[in-house]
Image (tube, rainbow, N blue to C red):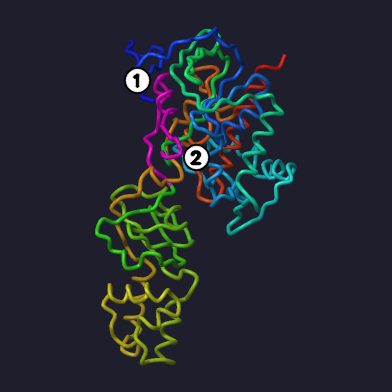
Amino acid sequence: MVLRFSNIPAGGIRTLHLRSPPIRGTSVSMQINTLILGAGAAGMMCAAHAGPGALVVDHAKAAGEKIRISGGGRCNFTNLHASPAEFLSQNPHFAKSALSRYSQWDFIDLVASHGIPYHEKTLGQLFCDTSAKDIIAMLRHEMAQARADLWLHTSVDNIHKTDHGFDVTLTRQGKSIPIKTRNLVVATGGKSIPKMGATGLAYQIAAQFGIDVIDTRPGLVPLTFTDARFKPLAGTATYARVTANATSFDEALLFTHRGLSGPAILQASSYWQEGDPITIAFAPQDDLRAILKQARETTPRKAMATVLAQTLPARLAGYLCDELNLTSQIANFSDAQIDQLCTQLTAWPLTPSGSEGYLTAEVTLGGINTDALSSKTMEAKAIPGLYFIGECVDVTGWLGGYNFQWAWSSGWAAGQAITAKTLP
Protein backbone atom coordinates (compact mmCIF):
# COMPACT_ATOMS: atom_id res chain seq x y z
CA MET A 1 0.00 0.00 0.00
CA VAL A 2 1.47 3.35 -1.10
CA LEU A 3 0.32 6.34 0.92
CA ARG A 4 0.41 10.07 0.41
CA PHE A 5 -0.90 13.13 2.22
CA SER A 6 -3.27 15.63 0.65
CA ASN A 7 -1.95 19.18 0.30
CA ILE A 8 -3.48 21.56 2.80
CA PRO A 9 -2.31 24.67 4.67
CA ALA A 10 0.35 24.12 7.32
CA GLY A 11 -1.09 23.28 10.71
CA GLY A 12 -4.37 21.91 9.33
CA ILE A 13 -5.67 18.38 9.75
CA ARG A 14 -4.71 16.21 6.80
CA THR A 15 -6.31 13.11 5.37
CA LEU A 16 -4.34 9.98 4.51
CA HIS A 17 -5.09 8.67 1.01
CA LEU A 18 -4.09 5.96 -1.42
CA ARG A 19 -2.53 7.05 -4.70
CA SER A 20 -5.30 5.15 -6.45
CA PRO A 21 -8.98 5.52 -5.50
CA PRO A 22 -10.53 2.95 -3.16
CA ILE A 23 -12.29 -0.06 -4.57
CA ARG A 24 -15.94 0.59 -5.44
CA GLY A 25 -18.73 -1.05 -3.51
CA THR A 26 -18.76 1.20 -0.45
CA SER A 27 -21.38 0.25 2.11
CA VAL A 28 -23.09 2.27 4.83
CA SER A 29 -20.62 3.41 7.50
CA MET A 30 -20.11 1.11 10.45
CA GLN A 31 -20.15 2.91 13.78
CA ILE A 32 -17.90 1.49 16.46
CA ASN A 33 -16.32 2.66 19.67
CA THR A 34 -12.69 1.73 19.03
CA LEU A 35 -10.70 0.87 15.91
CA ILE A 36 -7.28 -0.66 16.56
CA LEU A 37 -4.80 -0.76 13.69
CA GLY A 38 -2.48 -3.73 14.11
CA ALA A 39 -3.13 -7.24 15.44
CA GLY A 40 0.23 -7.62 17.13
CA ALA A 41 1.05 -7.88 20.82
CA ALA A 42 0.07 -4.31 21.75
CA GLY A 43 -3.02 -4.19 19.55
CA MET A 44 -4.51 -7.44 20.83
CA MET A 45 -3.70 -6.50 24.42
CA CYS A 46 -5.47 -3.18 23.96
CA ALA A 47 -8.51 -4.86 22.42
CA ALA A 48 -8.80 -7.16 25.41
CA HIS A 49 -9.17 -4.13 27.69
CA ALA A 50 -10.89 -1.49 25.54
CA GLY A 51 -14.40 -2.75 26.24
CA PRO A 52 -17.11 -3.93 23.82
CA GLY A 53 -17.15 -2.38 20.39
CA ALA A 54 -13.45 -2.72 19.60
CA LEU A 55 -12.38 -3.81 16.14
CA VAL A 56 -8.79 -4.88 15.41
CA VAL A 57 -7.67 -4.81 11.76
CA ASP A 58 -4.45 -6.02 10.16
CA HIS A 59 -3.24 -6.54 6.60
CA ALA A 60 -1.56 -9.82 7.60
CA LYS A 61 -3.07 -13.27 7.13
CA ALA A 62 -2.78 -14.11 10.84
CA ALA A 63 -2.71 -12.25 14.14
CA GLY A 64 0.43 -12.05 16.28
CA GLU A 65 2.96 -13.09 13.64
CA LYS A 66 5.89 -11.50 15.49
CA ILE A 67 4.78 -13.29 18.64
CA ARG A 68 4.73 -16.57 16.74
CA ILE A 69 8.34 -16.31 15.52
CA SER A 70 9.81 -14.78 18.68
CA GLY A 71 12.11 -16.64 21.01
CA GLY A 72 12.73 -19.42 18.51
CA GLY A 73 9.00 -20.15 18.47
CA ARG A 74 8.71 -20.15 22.27
CA CYS A 75 8.06 -16.41 22.80
CA ASN A 76 10.18 -14.65 25.41
CA PHE A 77 7.01 -12.96 26.65
CA THR A 78 8.42 -10.87 29.52
CA ASN A 79 11.34 -10.49 31.91
CA LEU A 80 11.36 -10.87 35.67
CA HIS A 81 13.57 -7.79 35.98
CA ALA A 82 11.57 -5.43 33.75
CA SER A 83 11.78 -1.83 34.93
CA PRO A 84 12.09 1.57 33.22
CA ALA A 85 15.90 1.29 33.48
CA GLU A 86 15.94 -1.27 30.63
CA PHE A 87 14.24 1.00 28.11
CA LEU A 88 15.66 3.60 25.73
CA SER A 89 13.71 6.76 24.97
CA GLN A 90 14.32 10.45 24.48
CA ASN A 91 12.21 10.77 27.65
CA PRO A 92 13.39 7.98 29.97
CA HIS A 93 10.56 8.71 32.42
CA PHE A 94 7.71 8.21 29.97
CA ALA A 95 7.43 4.41 30.34
CA LYS A 96 7.28 4.48 34.13
CA SER A 97 3.51 4.91 34.43
CA ALA A 98 2.41 2.10 32.14
CA LEU A 99 5.12 -0.31 33.31
CA SER A 100 4.26 0.23 36.96
CA ARG A 101 0.48 -0.03 36.53
CA TYR A 102 0.67 -3.17 34.39
CA SER A 103 3.89 -4.95 35.29
CA GLN A 104 5.52 -8.22 34.33
CA TRP A 105 3.84 -9.79 37.36
CA ASP A 106 0.40 -8.89 35.99
CA PHE A 107 1.19 -10.53 32.66
CA ILE A 108 2.70 -13.57 34.37
CA ASP A 109 -0.56 -13.93 36.34
CA LEU A 110 -2.51 -13.78 33.07
CA VAL A 111 -0.30 -16.48 31.52
CA ALA A 112 -0.70 -18.64 34.61
CA SER A 113 -4.49 -18.16 34.63
CA HIS A 114 -4.60 -19.70 31.15
CA GLY A 115 -2.55 -22.68 32.29
CA ILE A 116 0.31 -21.91 29.93
CA PRO A 117 3.50 -23.63 31.13
CA TYR A 118 6.63 -21.50 31.03
CA HIS A 119 10.21 -21.45 32.27
CA GLU A 120 12.96 -18.98 33.10
CA LYS A 121 16.14 -18.84 31.10
CA THR A 122 19.13 -16.60 31.78
CA LEU A 123 18.78 -13.07 33.08
CA GLY A 124 15.11 -13.34 34.02
CA GLN A 125 13.82 -14.21 30.55
CA LEU A 126 10.53 -16.13 30.55
CA PHE A 127 9.63 -18.47 27.67
CA CYS A 128 6.67 -20.71 26.88
CA ASP A 129 7.42 -24.39 27.45
CA THR A 130 5.55 -25.48 24.33
CA SER A 131 4.85 -22.79 21.75
CA ALA A 132 4.50 -19.05 21.22
CA LYS A 133 1.09 -19.88 19.76
CA ASP A 134 -0.10 -20.34 23.36
CA ILE A 135 0.33 -16.60 23.92
CA ILE A 136 -1.53 -15.77 20.70
CA ALA A 137 -4.38 -18.11 21.67
CA MET A 138 -4.52 -16.50 25.12
CA LEU A 139 -4.80 -13.01 23.64
CA ARG A 140 -7.44 -14.14 21.14
CA HIS A 141 -9.42 -15.65 24.02
CA GLU A 142 -9.14 -12.42 26.02
CA MET A 143 -10.34 -10.46 22.98
CA ALA A 144 -13.31 -12.77 22.57
CA GLN A 145 -14.19 -12.35 26.23
CA ALA A 146 -14.11 -8.58 25.73
CA ARG A 147 -16.30 -8.94 22.60
CA ALA A 148 -13.63 -7.45 20.35
CA ASP A 149 -13.64 -8.34 16.65
CA LEU A 150 -10.67 -9.13 14.42
CA TRP A 151 -10.43 -8.49 10.67
CA LEU A 152 -7.40 -9.82 8.83
CA HIS A 153 -6.41 -9.18 5.20
CA THR A 154 -7.66 -5.64 5.78
CA SER A 155 -5.86 -2.47 4.70
CA VAL A 156 -6.26 1.18 5.68
CA ASP A 157 -7.16 3.51 2.81
CA ASN A 158 -7.68 6.84 4.56
CA ILE A 159 -8.12 8.43 7.96
CA HIS A 160 -9.92 11.69 8.69
CA LYS A 161 -10.56 13.46 12.01
CA THR A 162 -14.14 14.51 12.72
CA ASP A 163 -15.86 16.31 15.57
CA HIS A 164 -16.96 12.99 17.03
CA GLY A 165 -13.91 10.85 16.36
CA PHE A 166 -12.50 9.52 13.10
CA ASP A 167 -13.73 8.45 9.69
CA VAL A 168 -11.58 5.58 8.44
CA THR A 169 -11.93 3.76 5.13
CA LEU A 170 -10.77 0.15 5.06
CA THR A 171 -10.50 -2.32 2.21
CA ARG A 172 -11.54 -5.88 2.99
CA GLN A 173 -12.37 -8.72 0.63
CA GLY A 174 -12.24 -6.31 -2.30
CA LYS A 175 -14.72 -3.89 -0.79
CA SER A 176 -14.24 -0.39 0.56
CA ILE A 177 -15.69 -0.20 4.06
CA PRO A 178 -16.21 3.19 5.78
CA ILE A 179 -15.87 3.16 9.56
CA LYS A 180 -16.88 5.80 12.08
CA THR A 181 -15.01 5.35 15.35
CA ARG A 182 -14.75 7.37 18.54
CA ASN A 183 -11.25 6.10 19.28
CA LEU A 184 -8.40 5.19 16.95
CA VAL A 185 -5.48 3.17 18.33
CA VAL A 186 -2.32 2.87 16.25
CA ALA A 187 -0.50 -0.36 17.06
CA THR A 188 1.14 -1.04 13.70
CA GLY A 189 4.67 -1.48 15.04
CA GLY A 190 7.87 -0.06 13.59
CA LYS A 191 9.99 -0.81 10.54
CA SER A 192 11.75 -3.92 11.81
CA ILE A 193 11.41 -7.24 9.93
CA PRO A 194 9.55 -5.98 6.85
CA LYS A 195 9.00 -9.56 5.66
CA MET A 196 6.54 -9.84 8.58
CA GLY A 197 4.57 -6.89 7.23
CA ALA A 198 6.24 -3.90 8.90
CA THR A 199 5.45 -0.72 6.97
CA GLY A 200 6.09 2.32 9.17
CA LEU A 201 2.42 3.29 8.78
CA ALA A 202 2.29 4.63 12.34
CA TYR A 203 4.80 7.35 11.50
CA GLN A 204 2.76 8.43 8.47
CA ILE A 205 -0.37 8.67 10.60
CA ALA A 206 1.56 10.71 13.17
CA ALA A 207 2.74 13.07 10.45
CA GLN A 208 -0.81 13.44 9.20
CA PHE A 209 -1.83 14.86 12.56
CA GLY A 210 1.27 16.96 13.12
CA ILE A 211 2.78 14.64 15.74
CA ASP A 212 6.58 14.65 15.88
CA VAL A 213 8.48 11.44 15.13
CA ILE A 214 11.94 10.85 16.58
CA ASP A 215 14.33 9.64 13.86
CA THR A 216 14.13 5.87 13.64
CA ARG A 217 16.92 3.32 13.25
CA PRO A 218 17.31 -0.44 13.63
CA GLY A 219 17.78 -1.79 17.15
CA LEU A 220 18.82 -5.18 18.54
CA VAL A 221 20.55 -5.87 15.25
CA PRO A 222 23.79 -7.60 14.13
CA LEU A 223 26.70 -5.31 13.24
CA THR A 224 28.56 -5.65 9.95
CA PHE A 225 32.11 -5.14 8.64
CA THR A 226 32.67 -4.61 4.92
CA ASP A 227 36.17 -6.12 4.99
CA ALA A 228 34.83 -9.59 5.92
CA ARG A 229 37.49 -9.70 8.62
CA PHE A 230 35.60 -12.23 10.74
CA LYS A 231 34.75 -14.66 7.97
CA PRO A 232 37.38 -17.17 9.24
CA LEU A 233 35.60 -17.14 12.61
CA ALA A 234 32.04 -17.53 11.29
CA GLY A 235 30.04 -19.69 13.67
CA THR A 236 32.40 -19.18 16.63
CA ALA A 237 30.73 -18.01 19.83
CA THR A 238 32.24 -16.81 23.09
CA TYR A 239 31.25 -14.98 26.24
CA ALA A 240 32.27 -11.33 26.09
CA ARG A 241 31.59 -7.83 27.34
CA VAL A 242 30.58 -5.49 24.52
CA THR A 243 30.55 -1.75 25.14
CA ALA A 244 28.95 0.92 22.97
CA ASN A 245 28.83 4.56 24.06
CA ALA A 246 29.66 3.74 27.70
CA THR A 247 26.97 1.04 28.02
CA SER A 248 28.18 -2.55 28.45
CA PHE A 249 26.58 -5.97 28.17
CA ASP A 250 28.07 -9.29 29.31
CA GLU A 251 26.55 -12.03 27.16
CA ALA A 252 27.35 -14.33 24.26
CA LEU A 253 29.02 -12.92 21.16
CA LEU A 254 28.79 -14.68 17.79
CA PHE A 255 31.10 -14.17 14.80
CA THR A 256 29.37 -14.31 11.41
CA HIS A 257 30.36 -14.08 7.75
CA ARG A 258 29.14 -10.48 7.75
CA GLY A 259 30.36 -9.36 11.18
CA LEU A 260 29.19 -9.76 14.77
CA SER A 261 25.97 -10.96 16.34
CA GLY A 262 24.81 -12.71 19.51
CA PRO A 263 22.99 -11.23 22.51
CA ALA A 264 25.89 -8.99 23.64
CA ILE A 265 26.13 -7.38 20.19
CA LEU A 266 22.37 -7.06 19.76
CA GLN A 267 22.09 -5.31 23.12
CA ALA A 268 24.99 -2.95 22.40
CA SER A 269 23.64 -2.17 18.92
CA SER A 270 20.79 -0.17 20.42
CA TYR A 271 23.35 2.19 21.94
CA TRP A 272 25.64 2.23 18.91
CA GLN A 273 25.45 4.98 16.28
CA GLU A 274 26.89 4.64 12.78
CA GLY A 275 30.58 5.57 12.78
CA ASP A 276 31.01 4.91 16.49
CA PRO A 277 33.53 2.36 17.79
CA ILE A 278 32.69 -0.51 20.11
CA THR A 279 35.01 -2.35 22.46
CA ILE A 280 35.07 -6.05 23.25
CA ALA A 281 36.40 -7.63 26.43
CA PHE A 282 36.99 -11.35 26.02
CA ALA A 283 36.47 -13.69 28.99
CA PRO A 284 35.31 -10.85 31.31
CA GLN A 285 34.51 -13.44 33.97
CA ASP A 286 38.14 -14.60 34.15
CA ASP A 287 41.36 -13.06 35.44
CA LEU A 288 43.39 -13.32 32.23
CA ARG A 289 46.52 -11.85 33.80
CA ALA A 290 46.59 -14.50 36.50
CA ILE A 291 45.87 -17.29 34.00
CA LEU A 292 48.67 -16.24 31.63
CA LYS A 293 51.25 -15.65 34.34
CA GLN A 294 50.50 -19.00 35.92
CA ALA A 295 50.81 -20.71 32.51
CA ARG A 296 54.19 -19.06 32.03
CA GLU A 297 55.35 -20.80 35.20
CA THR A 298 53.76 -24.20 34.66
CA THR A 299 53.86 -24.64 30.85
CA PRO A 300 56.48 -22.15 29.60
CA ARG A 301 57.01 -23.86 26.24
CA LYS A 302 53.39 -23.58 25.10
CA ALA A 303 52.55 -21.11 22.37
CA MET A 304 50.42 -18.16 23.40
CA ALA A 305 47.58 -19.34 21.15
CA THR A 306 47.56 -22.70 22.93
CA VAL A 307 47.41 -21.05 26.35
CA LEU A 308 44.61 -18.67 25.31
CA ALA A 309 42.68 -21.63 23.88
CA GLN A 310 42.26 -22.87 27.44
CA THR A 311 40.03 -19.83 28.08
CA LEU A 312 38.77 -18.84 24.61
CA PRO A 313 37.59 -20.95 21.65
CA ALA A 314 40.65 -22.31 19.84
CA ARG A 315 39.80 -20.62 16.53
CA LEU A 316 39.38 -17.29 18.26
CA ALA A 317 42.61 -17.69 20.22
CA GLY A 318 44.53 -18.42 17.02
CA TYR A 319 42.89 -15.53 15.21
CA LEU A 320 43.74 -13.05 17.97
CA CYS A 321 47.33 -14.20 18.13
CA ASP A 322 47.67 -13.73 14.38
CA GLU A 323 46.08 -10.28 14.61
CA LEU A 324 48.40 -9.23 17.45
CA ASN A 325 51.46 -11.08 16.10
CA LEU A 326 51.79 -13.26 19.17
CA THR A 327 53.77 -16.17 17.75
CA SER A 328 56.23 -16.77 20.59
CA GLN A 329 56.14 -19.20 23.48
CA ILE A 330 54.56 -17.82 26.62
CA ALA A 331 57.91 -18.08 28.44
CA ASN A 332 59.15 -15.17 26.32
CA PHE A 333 56.47 -12.76 27.60
CA SER A 334 57.42 -10.40 30.41
CA ASP A 335 54.95 -9.18 33.02
CA ALA A 336 54.65 -5.90 31.12
CA GLN A 337 53.92 -7.70 27.84
CA ILE A 338 51.30 -9.88 29.50
CA ASP A 339 49.72 -6.78 31.03
CA GLN A 340 49.66 -5.10 27.61
CA LEU A 341 48.12 -8.18 25.99
CA CYS A 342 45.42 -8.38 28.65
CA THR A 343 44.62 -4.72 28.09
CA GLN A 344 44.20 -5.43 24.37
CA LEU A 345 42.00 -8.47 25.01
CA THR A 346 39.77 -6.63 27.47
CA ALA A 347 39.38 -3.45 25.41
CA TRP A 348 39.62 -4.52 21.77
CA PRO A 349 38.44 -1.52 19.71
CA LEU A 350 36.40 -2.11 16.55
CA THR A 351 34.43 0.23 14.30
CA PRO A 352 31.57 -1.53 12.51
CA SER A 353 30.76 -0.49 8.96
CA GLY A 354 27.06 -0.63 9.69
CA SER A 355 24.30 -3.00 10.72
CA GLU A 356 22.09 -5.52 8.98
CA GLY A 357 19.32 -2.94 9.11
CA TYR A 358 15.60 -3.39 9.53
CA LEU A 359 15.72 -6.66 7.63
CA THR A 360 16.91 -8.52 10.75
CA ALA A 361 16.50 -5.89 13.49
CA GLU A 362 14.26 -7.11 16.29
CA VAL A 363 12.99 -3.61 17.11
CA THR A 364 12.85 -0.05 15.83
CA LEU A 365 14.50 2.66 17.90
CA GLY A 366 12.91 6.12 17.94
CA GLY A 367 9.34 6.65 16.80
CA ILE A 368 6.39 8.66 18.02
CA ASN A 369 7.69 11.46 20.24
CA THR A 370 6.48 10.76 23.76
CA ASP A 371 6.12 14.50 24.40
CA ALA A 372 3.00 14.30 22.25
CA LEU A 373 1.43 11.50 24.32
CA SER A 374 -0.02 11.07 27.80
CA SER A 375 2.19 8.63 29.70
CA LYS A 376 -0.88 7.41 31.60
CA THR A 377 -3.25 6.80 28.70
CA MET A 378 -1.05 6.78 25.55
CA GLU A 379 -3.49 9.28 24.03
CA ALA A 380 -2.23 12.09 21.82
CA LYS A 381 -2.46 15.29 23.83
CA ALA A 382 -3.56 17.42 20.87
CA ILE A 383 -5.82 14.85 19.15
CA PRO A 384 -8.47 13.43 21.53
CA GLY A 385 -9.27 9.82 20.79
CA LEU A 386 -6.00 9.05 18.98
CA TYR A 387 -3.65 6.59 20.72
CA PHE A 388 -0.21 5.19 19.87
CA ILE A 389 1.03 2.02 21.59
CA GLY A 390 3.77 -0.57 21.33
CA GLU A 391 6.86 -0.47 19.14
CA CYS A 392 5.83 2.59 17.13
CA VAL A 393 6.34 4.78 20.22
CA ASP A 394 9.81 6.08 21.15
CA VAL A 395 10.22 3.44 23.87
CA THR A 396 12.55 0.53 23.11
CA GLY A 397 13.49 -2.23 25.52
CA TRP A 398 16.53 -4.43 25.89
CA LEU A 399 16.70 -7.91 24.44
CA GLY A 400 15.03 -10.50 26.65
CA GLY A 401 11.27 -9.94 26.82
CA TYR A 402 11.33 -6.23 27.62
CA ASN A 403 9.73 -5.11 24.35
CA PHE A 404 6.86 -7.52 24.77
CA GLN A 405 6.33 -6.14 28.26
CA TRP A 406 6.11 -2.63 26.79
CA ALA A 407 3.50 -3.93 24.35
CA TRP A 408 1.45 -5.43 27.18
CA SER A 409 1.79 -2.37 29.42
CA SER A 410 1.11 0.30 26.78
CA GLY A 411 -1.76 -1.70 25.27
CA TRP A 412 -3.31 -2.17 28.69
CA ALA A 413 -2.94 1.54 29.52
CA ALA A 414 -4.72 2.63 26.35
CA GLY A 415 -7.43 0.00 26.78
CA GLN A 416 -8.10 1.05 30.34
CA ALA A 417 -8.28 4.72 29.33
CA ILE A 418 -10.79 3.97 26.56
CA THR A 419 -12.95 1.90 28.89
CA ALA A 420 -12.90 4.67 31.48
CA LYS A 421 -14.12 7.18 28.88
CA THR A 422 -17.04 5.00 27.82
CA LEU A 423 -18.29 4.15 31.30
CA PRO A 424 -21.47 6.05 32.29
> What residue appears at the point 31 percent right and 52 percent down from the top-left corner?
276
Residue 388 appears in view:
no
User: Which residue is located at x 51 percent, y 50 percent?
Assistant: 399
Pinpoint residue 115: horizontal percent, then vertical percent. 74, 46
Tell me the element at label 2.
Answer: loop
Q: Circles 2 and 1: CB distance less than 8 Å? A: no
Say if residue 114 shows up in the picture: yes
Q: Nearer the viewer, mark 2 or mark 1?
A: 1
Position of residue 310 measured from the top left corner of the image (x, y, whole percent): 45, 80
Measuring 61% from the left and 29% from the top, which residue is drawn there? 46
**Residue bearing mark 1:** 4
- Tell me the distance, in whole angstroms, between the alpha carbons under discs 2 and 1: 32 Å
Say whether disc 2 or disc 1 marks the residue closer to the N-terminus.
1
Q: Where in the figure is residue 151, as x and y percent of width and height?
A: 56, 25
- Of the 4 image quadrants, the one containing the N terminus is top left
Point out the stretch of residues depicted in magenta.
194-219
Q: Amino acid at mark 1?
A: Arg
Please name the residue that numbered disc 2 is placed on.
92
Could you tell me the amino acid type at mark 2? Answer: Pro
The answer to whether 294 appears left or right of 95 in the picture is left
